[in-house]
Image (tube, rainbow, N blue to C red):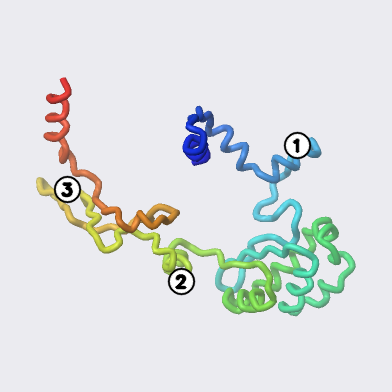
Amino acid sequence: MAALYEREKTGKGQLLHTSLLETALAMTSFSAASYLATGENPQRSGNRHPSICPYNIYRTRDGLITVAVANDKMWERFCSCLGLDQLRDDPAYKTNELRLKNQDALELELEARMKMDKTEKILQLLKEAKVSCSRVNSLDQAFSSEEVRALDIFLPKGSKHDMIAGRLGKKQAMGTRTRLVGPPFHMDCMDQLEEDNAPRLGQHSQMIRKWLEEST
């Protein structure tokens, strides 16, 4: 997109070079930055964050939630809303640096607390205290959530989107509607595009033959 914009402004095109290797390296993000700055290989940390604590996925009585306590002020609110005053006042956990240093012991305390209540109750407490958190959803929970439904990302959107369901003997079952996840972006012009189904076997054979005959 940047190259197209450059061409629009200057009239000069761009030759793009990229690779899966470059993409993979770029996705290492802060792990790569840490290694390049210190020369030390990052160790496996599971769902923990290498420089923020607590930042993890926790099991509740009926599910999983993710929590990211971004700073010391949020840590105080986090402890207060969950009734963890003893952790809030503990000198070993006073700062993010100390919490990282004593992370293993702290995580045991937090895991025990999270298991005491159901997901909805804990989320409500954390959100009211303005602590970064979210439910860890299965696909059925994600697709039925209010946030995903509001994205209007599913296909079809009121027009045909048929598929070949398979073969039943010599008969081909056709016309079965299937739901798909649409493009993860939205533009005004996309509402005017006509959705269509994938071509059936041989559907365009005659058109292709005619094109080849006319082009030779």
Would you say 210 lies left or right of 86 here?
left
Sequence-wise, which precedes: disc 3 or disc 2? 2
Marks 1/2: CA–CA distance: 41 Å
Seen from this angle, which residue lies furthest right?
91
Going by the image, does 48 lie left or right of 180?
right
Q: Which mark is residue 36?
A: 1
Q: Is residue 42 above or below residue 108?
A: above
* Closest to the observer, 130 or 96: 130
Indicate which disc, 1 or 2, sits on the residue closer to the N terminus: 1
Marks 3/1: CA–CA distance: 56 Å
Give the quarter of the image for residue 181: bottom left
Q: Residues within 10 Å of mark 1 (few under 14, many from 20)?
A: few
Q: In the structure shown, which secondary structural element does the residue marked by tag 3 occupy?
A: strand
In the image as oriented, which residue stretches furthest toward the front? 10
**Three-letter residue code for mark 2:** Glu
Residue 158's x, y, as percent?
A: 26, 63
Instruction: Name which residue lies at 59% across and 76% down.
Output: 118
Q: Are marks 1 and 2 in contact (CB under 8 Å)?
A: no
Which residue lies under the disc numbered 3? Answer: 167
Numbered tag placed on residue 65 in the rendering: none
